[in-house]
Amino acid sequence: MNKVQKTAYELIKSDARFLYSLTDISKNAQNISSNYICMSLPYIGLFVDGAEQWCKKLGLNTPRFNQTEKVFYTQLRQAHKLFGKSYEDYTTILFEKFTESDNYFYGIRSLIEKILGYYNVGTDLCNDEFCGNTILCSMYIPINILDNDGVGSWIRDMSIVAGKLGSFFLGEEFQVYRYNDNLIIKSRDYHFCKNSPLKMNDDFGFILFSILCSINYAIEFIENYFIDEIPQKFKFAYLQYYYLCDFIKELNSRKNTNFHLDNCLYDRNFRNCLAHYGLGQYINETEIISHDILKGLTNKAFGKDYLTTKKELFEILKSLTKQIRKEILE
Protein backbone atom coordinates (compact mmCIF):
# COMPACT_ATOMS: atom_id res chain seq x y z
CA MET A 1 0.00 0.00 0.00
CA ASN A 2 1.13 3.56 -0.65
CA LYS A 3 1.16 6.24 2.06
CA VAL A 4 -2.37 7.46 1.32
CA GLN A 5 -3.76 3.91 1.42
CA LYS A 6 -1.92 3.21 4.67
CA THR A 7 -3.46 6.38 6.11
CA ALA A 8 -6.95 5.24 5.09
CA TYR A 9 -6.14 1.87 6.68
CA GLU A 10 -5.37 3.62 9.98
CA LEU A 11 -8.67 5.52 9.92
CA ILE A 12 -10.60 2.32 9.20
CA LYS A 13 -8.71 0.62 12.02
CA SER A 14 -9.81 3.42 14.34
CA ASP A 15 -13.46 2.78 13.47
CA ALA A 16 -12.91 -0.93 14.08
CA ARG A 17 -11.51 -0.09 17.50
CA PHE A 18 -14.58 2.03 18.21
CA LEU A 19 -16.84 -0.91 17.31
CA TYR A 20 -14.82 -3.19 19.58
CA SER A 21 -15.15 -0.62 22.37
CA LEU A 22 -18.95 -0.74 22.04
CA THR A 23 -18.88 -4.48 22.62
CA ASP A 24 -16.68 -4.00 25.70
CA ILE A 25 -19.09 -1.38 27.07
CA SER A 26 -22.03 -3.74 26.60
CA LYS A 27 -20.23 -6.43 28.60
CA ASN A 28 -18.32 -4.54 31.26
CA ALA A 29 -19.66 -1.02 31.82
CA GLN A 30 -21.66 -0.61 35.03
CA ASN A 31 -23.30 2.80 34.88
CA ILE A 32 -24.85 2.92 31.44
CA SER A 33 -28.41 2.10 30.51
CA SER A 34 -29.42 3.47 27.12
CA ASN A 35 -29.83 2.84 23.42
CA TYR A 36 -26.25 3.91 22.72
CA ILE A 37 -25.54 0.99 20.36
CA CYS A 38 -28.74 1.53 18.37
CA MET A 39 -27.90 5.22 18.06
CA SER A 40 -24.50 4.16 16.66
CA LEU A 41 -26.01 1.97 13.93
CA PRO A 42 -25.61 4.44 11.04
CA TYR A 43 -21.93 4.85 11.89
CA ILE A 44 -21.44 1.10 12.29
CA GLY A 45 -23.01 0.75 8.84
CA LEU A 46 -20.55 3.31 7.45
CA PHE A 47 -17.61 1.36 8.85
CA VAL A 48 -18.72 -2.11 7.78
CA ASP A 49 -19.92 -1.18 4.30
CA GLY A 50 -17.01 1.19 3.69
CA ALA A 51 -14.37 -1.22 4.97
CA GLU A 52 -15.74 -4.13 2.91
CA GLN A 53 -15.72 -2.05 -0.28
CA TRP A 54 -12.28 -0.58 0.43
CA CYS A 55 -10.75 -4.02 0.98
CA LYS A 56 -12.39 -5.34 -2.18
CA LYS A 57 -10.91 -2.50 -4.26
CA LEU A 58 -7.43 -3.22 -2.89
CA GLY A 59 -7.83 -6.96 -3.40
CA LEU A 60 -7.27 -7.75 0.27
CA ASN A 61 -8.19 -11.21 1.53
CA THR A 62 -10.95 -10.13 3.92
CA PRO A 63 -14.54 -11.23 4.60
CA ARG A 64 -17.00 -10.40 1.82
CA PHE A 65 -20.72 -9.71 2.08
CA ASN A 66 -23.25 -12.29 1.01
CA GLN A 67 -26.27 -10.81 -0.76
CA THR A 68 -28.35 -10.42 2.41
CA GLU A 69 -25.50 -8.69 4.25
CA LYS A 70 -24.88 -6.41 1.28
CA VAL A 71 -28.48 -5.21 1.26
CA PHE A 72 -28.55 -4.81 5.05
CA TYR A 73 -25.36 -2.75 5.35
CA THR A 74 -26.15 -0.65 2.30
CA GLN A 75 -29.44 0.29 3.93
CA LEU A 76 -27.89 0.70 7.39
CA ARG A 77 -25.26 3.16 6.23
CA GLN A 78 -27.93 5.27 4.53
CA ALA A 79 -29.34 6.10 7.96
CA HIS A 80 -26.58 8.66 8.48
CA LYS A 81 -28.18 10.61 5.59
CA LEU A 82 -31.62 11.03 7.14
CA PHE A 83 -31.22 14.80 7.29
CA GLY A 84 -30.21 14.67 3.64
CA LYS A 85 -33.83 13.88 2.86
CA SER A 86 -36.40 16.57 2.26
CA TYR A 87 -38.23 17.90 5.29
CA GLU A 88 -41.40 16.17 4.10
CA ASP A 89 -39.72 12.79 3.60
CA TYR A 90 -37.92 12.96 6.95
CA THR A 91 -41.07 13.78 8.88
CA THR A 92 -43.03 11.09 7.04
CA ILE A 93 -40.53 8.42 8.11
CA LEU A 94 -40.28 9.82 11.63
CA PHE A 95 -44.03 9.69 12.24
CA GLU A 96 -44.48 6.34 10.53
CA LYS A 97 -42.09 4.91 13.13
CA PHE A 98 -43.74 6.94 15.88
CA THR A 99 -47.17 5.53 14.93
CA GLU A 100 -45.78 1.98 14.86
CA SER A 101 -44.40 2.47 18.37
CA ASP A 102 -47.57 4.08 19.70
CA ASN A 103 -49.79 1.35 18.27
CA TYR A 104 -47.54 -1.40 19.59
CA PHE A 105 -47.29 -0.12 23.15
CA TYR A 106 -50.97 0.80 23.20
CA GLY A 107 -51.78 -2.77 22.24
CA ILE A 108 -49.73 -4.39 25.02
CA ARG A 109 -50.82 -2.09 27.84
CA SER A 110 -51.07 -3.63 31.29
CA LEU A 111 -54.09 -2.94 33.46
CA ILE A 112 -52.19 -0.23 35.34
CA GLU A 113 -51.08 1.36 32.07
CA LYS A 114 -54.67 1.40 30.84
CA ILE A 115 -55.52 3.49 33.90
CA LEU A 116 -52.42 5.64 34.30
CA GLY A 117 -51.19 5.78 30.72
CA TYR A 118 -48.49 3.99 28.73
CA TYR A 119 -45.09 4.89 27.31
CA ASN A 120 -44.46 5.00 23.58
CA VAL A 121 -41.01 6.63 23.38
CA GLY A 122 -37.86 5.85 25.30
CA THR A 123 -35.21 8.55 25.66
CA ASP A 124 -31.54 8.63 26.66
CA LEU A 125 -29.80 11.33 28.67
CA CYS A 126 -26.12 12.10 29.17
CA ASN A 127 -25.25 14.90 31.56
CA ASP A 128 -29.01 15.53 31.64
CA GLU A 129 -28.98 16.28 27.90
CA PHE A 130 -31.25 14.22 25.63
CA CYS A 131 -29.00 12.23 23.32
CA GLY A 132 -31.19 9.53 21.82
CA ASN A 133 -34.69 8.17 21.47
CA THR A 134 -36.25 4.90 20.40
CA ILE A 135 -38.01 6.37 17.36
CA LEU A 136 -34.65 7.38 15.91
CA CYS A 137 -33.38 3.87 16.62
CA SER A 138 -36.31 2.44 14.67
CA MET A 139 -35.53 4.80 11.78
CA TYR A 140 -31.92 3.67 11.71
CA ILE A 141 -32.43 -0.08 11.47
CA PRO A 142 -33.91 -1.33 8.17
CA ILE A 143 -36.20 -3.98 9.66
CA ASN A 144 -39.18 -4.01 12.02
CA ILE A 145 -37.90 -4.37 15.58
CA LEU A 146 -41.29 -4.34 17.32
CA ASP A 147 -43.28 -7.53 17.81
CA ASN A 148 -40.60 -9.48 15.96
CA ASP A 149 -39.41 -12.52 17.89
CA GLY A 150 -36.62 -13.32 15.47
CA VAL A 151 -35.09 -9.87 15.24
CA GLY A 152 -32.37 -10.47 17.84
CA SER A 153 -30.96 -13.61 16.22
CA TRP A 154 -31.22 -12.05 12.76
CA ILE A 155 -29.24 -8.96 13.79
CA ARG A 156 -26.70 -11.24 15.49
CA ASP A 157 -26.22 -13.15 12.24
CA MET A 158 -25.86 -9.90 10.29
CA SER A 159 -23.25 -8.71 12.79
CA ILE A 160 -20.85 -11.61 12.30
CA VAL A 161 -19.29 -10.09 9.19
CA ALA A 162 -18.82 -6.79 11.07
CA GLY A 163 -16.88 -8.62 13.77
CA LYS A 164 -14.73 -10.39 11.21
CA LEU A 165 -13.91 -7.16 9.41
CA GLY A 166 -13.11 -5.47 12.72
CA SER A 167 -10.82 -8.32 13.69
CA PHE A 168 -8.97 -8.08 10.38
CA PHE A 169 -8.10 -4.42 10.93
CA LEU A 170 -7.31 -4.75 14.61
CA GLY A 171 -5.10 -7.80 14.20
CA GLU A 172 -3.60 -8.49 17.62
CA GLU A 173 -4.31 -4.97 18.89
CA PHE A 174 -7.65 -5.46 20.61
CA GLN A 175 -7.51 -2.28 22.65
CA VAL A 176 -10.58 -0.51 23.95
CA TYR A 177 -10.98 3.24 23.73
CA ARG A 178 -11.14 4.39 27.34
CA TYR A 179 -14.60 5.36 28.52
CA ASN A 180 -15.94 7.07 31.61
CA ASP A 181 -17.89 4.41 33.45
CA ASN A 182 -18.54 6.86 36.29
CA LEU A 183 -20.65 9.02 34.01
CA ILE A 184 -24.30 8.13 34.58
CA ILE A 185 -26.25 7.60 31.39
CA LYS A 186 -29.98 7.58 32.10
CA SER A 187 -33.00 6.28 30.21
CA ARG A 188 -36.50 7.69 30.64
CA ASP A 189 -39.76 6.68 29.00
CA TYR A 190 -42.51 9.12 28.08
CA HIS A 191 -45.92 9.17 26.47
CA PHE A 192 -45.54 11.63 23.61
CA CYS A 193 -47.21 13.93 23.24
CA LYS A 194 -49.52 13.74 26.29
CA ASN A 195 -46.80 13.31 28.87
CA SER A 196 -43.39 14.48 27.71
CA PRO A 197 -40.63 16.89 28.78
CA LEU A 198 -41.43 19.27 25.93
CA LYS A 199 -43.16 22.59 26.36
CA MET A 200 -43.84 22.49 22.62
CA ASN A 201 -45.97 19.40 22.96
CA ASP A 202 -46.93 18.74 19.34
CA ASP A 203 -45.59 17.09 16.18
CA PHE A 204 -43.20 19.92 15.38
CA GLY A 205 -41.87 19.76 18.92
CA PHE A 206 -41.09 16.08 18.44
CA ILE A 207 -39.33 16.81 15.14
CA LEU A 208 -37.11 19.38 16.85
CA PHE A 209 -36.60 17.01 19.78
CA SER A 210 -35.34 14.31 17.43
CA ILE A 211 -32.92 16.75 15.78
CA LEU A 212 -31.66 17.64 19.26
CA CYS A 213 -31.19 13.95 20.14
CA SER A 214 -29.32 13.27 16.89
CA ILE A 215 -26.84 16.09 17.46
CA ASN A 216 -26.40 15.44 21.17
CA TYR A 217 -25.55 11.79 20.58
CA ALA A 218 -22.32 13.04 19.01
CA ILE A 219 -21.51 16.20 20.96
CA GLU A 220 -22.71 15.05 24.39
CA PHE A 221 -22.56 11.25 24.59
CA ILE A 222 -19.63 10.37 22.31
CA GLU A 223 -17.73 13.49 23.37
CA ASN A 224 -18.08 12.97 27.11
CA TYR A 225 -18.35 9.20 27.51
CA PHE A 226 -15.12 8.46 25.65
CA ILE A 227 -12.13 9.83 27.52
CA ASP A 228 -9.57 9.95 24.72
CA GLU A 229 -9.74 12.32 21.76
CA ILE A 230 -10.87 9.87 19.08
CA PRO A 231 -11.71 10.50 15.40
CA GLN A 232 -15.31 9.43 15.91
CA LYS A 233 -16.00 12.52 18.03
CA PHE A 234 -15.43 14.75 15.02
CA LYS A 235 -16.66 12.32 12.36
CA PHE A 236 -20.10 11.65 13.84
CA ALA A 237 -20.66 15.33 14.62
CA TYR A 238 -19.55 16.47 11.18
CA LEU A 239 -21.83 14.06 9.31
CA GLN A 240 -24.81 15.36 11.29
CA TYR A 241 -23.72 18.93 10.62
CA TYR A 242 -23.21 18.40 6.89
CA TYR A 243 -26.77 17.25 6.22
CA LEU A 244 -28.35 19.63 8.70
CA CYS A 245 -27.00 22.66 6.84
CA ASP A 246 -29.59 22.27 4.08
CA PHE A 247 -32.22 20.59 6.25
CA ILE A 248 -32.42 23.51 8.69
CA LYS A 249 -32.82 25.94 5.80
CA GLU A 250 -35.79 23.96 4.49
CA LEU A 251 -37.24 23.59 7.99
CA ASN A 252 -37.09 27.37 8.44
CA SER A 253 -38.82 27.89 5.12
CA ARG A 254 -41.54 25.33 5.86
CA LYS A 255 -42.25 26.32 9.45
CA ASN A 256 -41.46 30.05 9.32
CA THR A 257 -38.76 29.64 11.96
CA ASN A 258 -35.37 31.30 12.21
CA PHE A 259 -32.92 28.65 13.40
CA HIS A 260 -29.34 29.49 12.46
CA LEU A 261 -26.66 26.96 11.51
CA ASP A 262 -23.40 28.42 10.22
CA ASN A 263 -22.40 26.57 7.03
CA CYS A 264 -18.76 27.75 7.04
CA LEU A 265 -17.50 24.14 7.40
CA TYR A 266 -19.77 22.68 4.73
CA ASP A 267 -17.55 20.76 2.28
CA ARG A 268 -18.80 17.91 0.10
CA ASN A 269 -15.37 16.47 -0.75
CA PHE A 270 -14.35 16.45 2.91
CA ARG A 271 -17.63 14.74 3.85
CA ASN A 272 -17.00 12.07 1.20
CA CYS A 273 -13.58 11.38 2.72
CA LEU A 274 -15.10 10.81 6.15
CA ALA A 275 -17.91 8.63 4.83
CA HIS A 276 -16.09 6.49 2.27
CA TYR A 277 -12.40 6.23 3.25
CA GLY A 278 -11.60 7.41 -0.29
CA LEU A 279 -8.59 9.51 0.63
CA GLY A 280 -6.80 8.94 -2.67
CA GLN A 281 -9.20 11.21 -4.55
CA TYR A 282 -8.76 14.04 -2.03
CA ILE A 283 -5.36 14.19 -0.39
CA ASN A 284 -1.83 13.46 -1.58
CA GLU A 285 1.09 12.01 0.33
CA THR A 286 2.76 15.35 1.06
CA GLU A 287 -0.41 16.68 2.70
CA ILE A 288 -0.77 13.80 5.18
CA ILE A 289 0.04 14.67 8.80
CA SER A 290 0.69 11.32 10.45
CA HIS A 291 0.46 12.50 14.07
CA ASP A 292 -2.85 14.33 13.48
CA ILE A 293 -6.02 12.57 14.61
CA LEU A 294 -7.60 12.96 11.15
CA LYS A 295 -4.25 12.74 9.37
CA GLY A 296 -4.35 16.29 8.03
CA LEU A 297 -7.80 16.15 6.44
CA THR A 298 -9.05 19.25 8.27
CA ASN A 299 -5.89 21.12 7.28
CA LYS A 300 -6.57 20.21 3.67
CA ALA A 301 -10.25 21.19 3.80
CA PHE A 302 -10.25 24.22 6.08
CA GLY A 303 -6.63 25.23 6.62
CA LYS A 304 -6.96 24.45 10.35
CA ASP A 305 -5.69 21.64 12.56
CA TYR A 306 -8.01 18.99 13.94
CA LEU A 307 -8.61 20.47 17.40
CA THR A 308 -9.24 23.98 16.09
CA THR A 309 -11.71 22.69 13.51
CA LYS A 310 -13.40 20.42 16.02
CA LYS A 311 -13.84 23.29 18.48
CA GLU A 312 -15.44 25.41 15.75
CA LEU A 313 -17.72 22.55 14.64
CA PHE A 314 -18.91 21.85 18.17
CA GLU A 315 -19.56 25.53 18.84
CA ILE A 316 -21.73 25.71 15.72
CA LEU A 317 -23.70 22.60 16.68
CA LYS A 318 -24.07 23.68 20.30
CA SER A 319 -25.43 27.00 19.11
CA LEU A 320 -28.14 25.13 17.20
CA THR A 321 -28.99 22.84 20.13
CA LYS A 322 -29.23 25.88 22.39
CA GLN A 323 -31.73 27.43 19.98
CA ILE A 324 -33.77 24.22 19.85
CA ARG A 325 -33.69 23.75 23.61
CA LYS A 326 -34.98 27.27 24.12
CA GLU A 327 -37.84 26.55 21.72
CA ILE A 328 -38.99 23.18 23.05
CA LEU A 329 -37.63 22.63 26.56
CA GLU A 330 -36.92 25.87 28.41
Image (cartoon, rainbow, N blue to C red):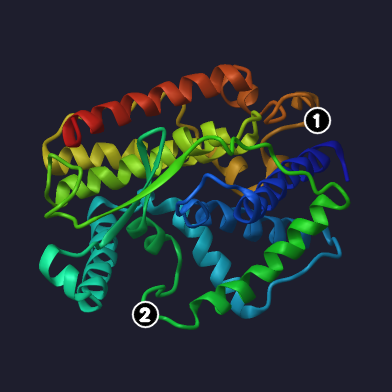
Horizontally, residue 138 falls left or right of residue 227, namely left
According to the picture, the residue beneath numbered tag 1 turns out to be: 285
Nearer mark to the viewer, of 1 and 2: 2
Horizontally, residue 281 falls left or right of residue 197, namely right
State whether residue 19 is above or below residue 7.
Answer: below
Q: Which mark is residue 97?
A: none
Between 144 and 186, the one lying in front of the other is 186
Horizontally, residue 6 falls left or right of residue 107, namely right
Q: Earlier in the sequence, mark 1 or mark 2?
A: 2
Location of residue 270 in the rendering, given as x and y in whole percent from the top left corner: 57, 35
Between 117 and 281, the one lying in front of the other is 117
Residue at the location (61% across, 25% down)? Answer: 298
Which part of the image, by quadrant, shows the C terminus? Answer: top left
Q: Which mark is residue 147?
A: 2
Spot the residue most to the front: 112
Looking at the rendered structure, the kind of residue marked 1 is: Glu
Disc 2 element: loop
Spot the residue most to the bottom: 149
Looking at the rendered structure, the kind of residue marked 2 is: Asp
- Can residue 270 be seen? no
Between 23 and 168, the one lying in front of the other is 23
- Can residue 272 be seen? yes
Location of residue 191 in the rendering, given as x and y in whole percent from the top left corner: 19, 57
Between 104 and 39, the one lying in front of the other is 104
State whether residue 53 is above or below residue 273.
Answer: below
Disc 1 element: helix
State whether residue 11 is above or below residue 318.
Answer: below
Residue at the location (62% across, 22% down)? Answer: 306
Residue at the location (86% across, 65% down)? Answer: 61
